[in-house]
Image: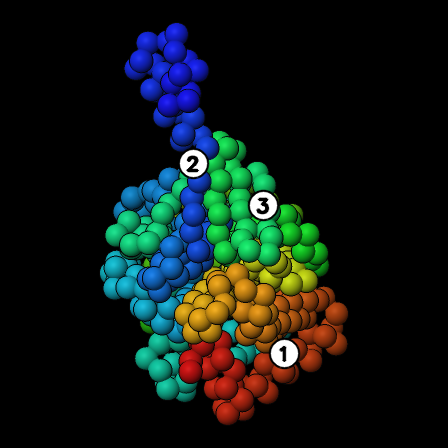
Amino acid sequence: MLLIRRYSRLPYNAALSLTKVFYMATQVHDCDICIVGNGAVGKAAALGLAQSGLRVVLLCHSALATPVSDHWDVRVFALNHVAQRLLASLKVWDALNMQRVAQVTEMRVKGGVATGDGQLDFDAYGARSQELAWIIEDRNLNQALDSAIKFSQNLEVVTGIATDLDSGAESAGLTLDNGSVIRASLIVGADGAQSWVRGQCDIGMDYRSYHQKGVVTNFECTKPHHGIARQWFVEEQGIIALLPLPGNRVSLVWSAPDALADELMREPLSALVARLETYCLDDLGHLTPVLPEDIKAFPLRLIRPHSMVADRVALIGDAAHAVHPLAGHGMNLGFGDVASLIELIKTREDHRDCGDRRLLERYRRSRKEDVLLMQVTTDCLARVFGSDLAPVRLVRNLGLNLLDRLPVIKNKLISHAMGSK
Ligand SMILES: Cc1cc2nc3c(=O)[nH]c(=O)nc-3n(C[C@H](O)[C@H](O)[C@H](O)COP(=O)(O)OP(=O)(O)OC[C@H]3O[C@@H](n4cnc5c(N)ncnc54)[C@H](O)[C@@H]3O)c2cc1C
């Protein structure tokens, strides 16, 4: 009204529109938890926390709209049982298009392809499970998450760019570029490896580039893959993984040194096929690109923030830890963060709010072991298998063969990777 009076020389309707614009620009969103970032990890956290009865705001750069397409997405994830249990509890698992999900029933790892002398096999039978993992397209996963979000109560999706983060004893707040404000008891940074939230909290981190890129694309093969995920450590050429997709399709993740990755991206896919067939022709037959020239590359790095929490702030997913994809576990770790955060918030004492310092400390402790184990394991494997030194090669190939003959230890390892209880 004040504004209308101020613009009293304008026609009434124009003054009313101006008031609306002003109101929208300075909108205040009050909630219990604000999640910043709409990757799969952020969306899962928003859903789970809203389903626990908390008022949640999901802050995204742009509206949620995962593109619809029948093409096979070159971005796929191997999800383990931790991820599956979380997605099932959020009612997202049943919303996936299961015709496009492949089960991994066996894993074959070969080290020292040049010398051909290191091999390690895991199978679901040995791990007393029907499957070791599921291969899911990014688009399939995000579409299922988007539709669950659309029908979720207590969950508001806000689009905008946060320009300021402020946290105090009673609450935390975000100011957006349009002047709107989000007030919450807890802010969750789910904004990926380059996390803006982490930067605002002055959380230091260790950063190391692997000087590699993950090159991804899909192929049809002439022989059935039998649900086997295949991986080759090929010394100076990096690590090649061919993951099963439904039908006779496989998805490539080639963690290649930067120069080689750039070459793979430049040359036609037929040249990439020729390179790959030297490794897999016996098992998979001839490869044909599923979609000509559909190929992407992602820089690979280790990001180890010094803490996963700050005052009224928690980090999840790649914002909290980015690891080498050789074990296919970054997203699984992120879903582990989500499961843990939801559980701790749901079971907190009545006198604690969602951003309570002790609660956040519990969250930090609950994730410490899993995250550290994955960071150290993937980092060591990436270094050891990237080494050209003959003694290192010998020891690691002997190690693979030795581990292959120790079923008890091997099955313990695979159960841990699967996230079995
Ligand atoms: C080649 C490759 C293969 C992989 N394979 C696997 C696998 O098989 N299994 C597995 O578990 N993991 C795998 N990973 C790891 C996995 O991709 C990541 O761990 C996972 O995508 C992280 O999800 P996230 O939601 O935390 O981050 P992201 O997917 O990076 O999402 C972050 C989101 O936040 C948004 N955002 C950023 N800044 C802001 C801001 N300031 N405000 C609002 N929004 C913001 C971004 O737009 C984005 O949507 C692989 C990774 C690579 C590179």
Image coordinates of residue 384 in percent, x first then y, are 68, 70
What's the residue type where badge 1 is placed?
Asn
Image coordinates of residue 198 in percent, x first then y, are 61, 52
Cβ of mark 1 under 8 Å from ligand 1: the answer is: no
What's the residue type where badge 3 is placed?
Leu
Q: CA distance from mark 3 to mark 1?
A: 49 Å
Q: Nearer the viewer, residue 112 or 265?
A: 265
Q: Which residue is mark 2?
A: 27
- Side of 125 relative to 353 (left or right): left
Residue in the picture at 75% in, 76% down: 391
Q: CA distance from mark 2 to mark 1?
A: 61 Å
Q: Which residue is mark 1?
A: 397
**Where is 291 relative to 214, above or below?**
above
If you read the primary sequence from the N terminus, does the residue marked by circle 2 or circle 3 appear first?
Answer: 2
Residue in the picture at 49% in, 76% down: 417
Q: Which residue is mark 3?
A: 165
Q: Nearer the viewer, residue 311 or 15?
A: 15
Helix, strand, or loop for circle 2?
Answer: loop
Disc 3 or disc 1, which is closer to the eye?
Answer: 3
Q: Which mark is residue 262?
A: none
| Number of marks in the rendered image | 3
